[in-house]
Image (tube, grey):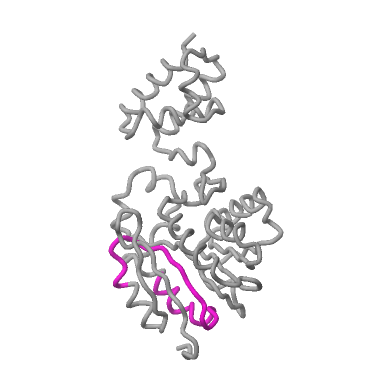
Amino acid sequence: MKRLLEIIQLSASFLEKKGIERARFEAEEVIADALLLKRLDLYLQFDRPLIEQELASVRERLQRRANREPLAYIHGRVTFGGLTFEVNPSVLIPRPETEILLATISETLSKEDVEGKVLWDVCAGSGCLGLCLKHRFPALTVVLSDLSPAALEVAKRNAGSLGLLSSVTFLEGDLFAPFSGMKCDYFVSNPPYITEEEYRSLAPEVREQEPKMALVSGVSGYEMYEKIASGLPHYLAEGGRGWLEMGTGQGDEIVKIFSSYDLFGSVASDYAGHDRFFFLEKSVGVPVR
């Protein structure tokens, strides 16, 4: 009967041969998930023998990782903003950079009276942004929308697990289509922003596993921003704020796109110093074009 340390070593070797980076770490993550343990707990059980049922569970997960399925999908969950969210191939896996966006929005809202204010999370995916904000600011009215029915179902399950299902509204449709006649005070979105050319060069874990519709924004990478910028003035209240994520190197063009619709703001960087976010505010008294 093989012991845990040997299984870790064999698994790391297997993943390394399959071209998986950080093979030892990923092997430990896979094995910990199969054994319902935290990764660091493995170090206390190196001499533990594994029964056949446990080995089968490890093998199944290792093969999935070897096939370039992301760890988050294998686990079926991810931690974001201190909360746990279900993820599957219907939704993007939340990135660490997006937690910067969450922190920035939270800092702004903490300084304002959000009672009765309405926040829209458009292209919501798993719902991680909007649900974290509702969890932190219960007085907010939060609406999550997505074009994908499957993504919305994931977001609803996440809301349910957080006890927020009855206090959040979910709308299905493309961008502003489900919001006819409605207004918001805060607009949040992590829309698709990569080009078709960039998509072809993505790692297999992204290109072959995550939903393309949540990644690609046409040939230029700016199509979704053009749509948001042209529609948002009709829905964002005067003095309202918006926060969007964007791709590296897109800052100058996105500033131009939004300013052409009298939506002015600034660009902020991610952990690596790359332009990653656009923050805007709708001026008071400016007529909608």
From the top left corner, tell me how far across and down residue 71 is, in percent. 45, 38
Residue closer to the observer: 9 or 284? 284
Tell me which corner region of the image, top left, top right, bottom left or bottom right, holds residue 24.
top left
Is residue 2 depicted above or below 222 in this figure? above
Quarter of the image with the C terminus is bottom left
Write the start and end of the magenta stretch as one range: 225-253
From the top left corner, tell me how far across and down residue 279 is, in percent. 42, 70
Residue at the (45%, 60%) spot, across then down: 101
Residue closer to the observer: 16 or 273? 273
Is residue 90 depicted above or below 32 in this figure? below
Residue closer to the observer: 79 or 17? 79
Is residue 254 depicted above or below 156 in this figure? below
From the top left corner, tell me how far across and down residue 184 is, in percent. 57, 75
Q: Is residue 239 magenta?
A: yes
Residue at the (45%, 31%) spot, across then down: 29
Residue at the (65%, 48%) spot, across then down: 161
In the image: residue 69, left or right of residue 118 = left
Can you name the residue that lies furthest to the right here? 166
